[in-house]
């Protein structure tokens, strides 16, 4: 008896790991260009836990789009370029989601201004 194939999207496991590694190095390389303190990097660094949880929710609907587009490219180099661009787009979506949540609903990110305000019923 064999186990069912969990890789339904027909993606290569190698490409998935390579996309994650390239995304990680891309963040490191981009951060090297900014010697001064940067709001973008600070926002991403302060909210990594939210990104970890939100990332899976964001990838679930985008997985279908990703597999349809990635199968369109015949060349492995074009697939890698697409994965780099896709990773950058996901980073921007996460960044702007965090900025909106910081402004309108900071408690979702685990941030609030005054701890005593949570105990008051006003």
Image (cartoon, grey):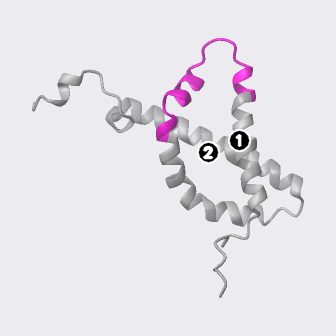
Quarter of the rendering containing residue 63:
bottom right
Which residue shows up at 61% across the image and 40% down it? 91
Residue to which mark 1 is pinned: 23
Residue drawn at (74%, 65%) of the image: 11
Left or right of 95 on screen, residue 65: right
* Residue designated by label 2: 90
Q: Secondary structure at mark 1?
A: helix
* Quadrant of the drawing holding the N terminus: bottom right
Residue sticking out furthest to the front: 1
Q: Residue at x 19, y 30 (%)?
A: 118
> Where does the magenta region start and end?
29-50
Q: Classify the position of the C terminus by image quarter.
A: top left
Q: Position of residue 102 (x, y in %)?
A: 40, 30
Given contact means CB atoms under 8 Å apart, are the residues at marks 1 and 2 in contact? yes
| Position of 67 relative to 114 (above/below) | below
Q: Residue furthest top?
A: 36
* Residue 117 location, quadrant: top left
Coordinates of residue 97 in the picture (x, y in percent): 48, 39
Q: Is residue 74 left or right of residue 106?
A: right
Q: Is residue 23 left or right of residue 55?
A: right
- 10 Å neighbourhood of mark 1: few (<14), some, or many (≥20)? many
Name which quarter of the figure residue 4 lies in.
bottom right
């Amino acid at each position: 008896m064999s186990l069912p194939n969990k890789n339904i999207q027909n993606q290569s496991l190698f490409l998935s790991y390579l996309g994650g590694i390239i995304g990680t190095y891309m963040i490191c390389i981009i951060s090297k260009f900014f010697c001064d303190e940067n709001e973008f990097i600070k926002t991403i660094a302060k909210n990594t836990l939210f990104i970890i949880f939100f990332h899976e929710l964001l990838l679930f609907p985008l997985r279908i789009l990703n597999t349809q587009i990635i199968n369109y490219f015949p060349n492995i180099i074009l697939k890698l370029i697409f994965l780099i661009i896709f990773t950058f787009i996901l980073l921007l979506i996460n960044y702007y989601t965090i900025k909106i949540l910081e402004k309108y609903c900071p408690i979702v990110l685990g941030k609030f201004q005054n701890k005593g305000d949570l105990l008051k019923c006003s």
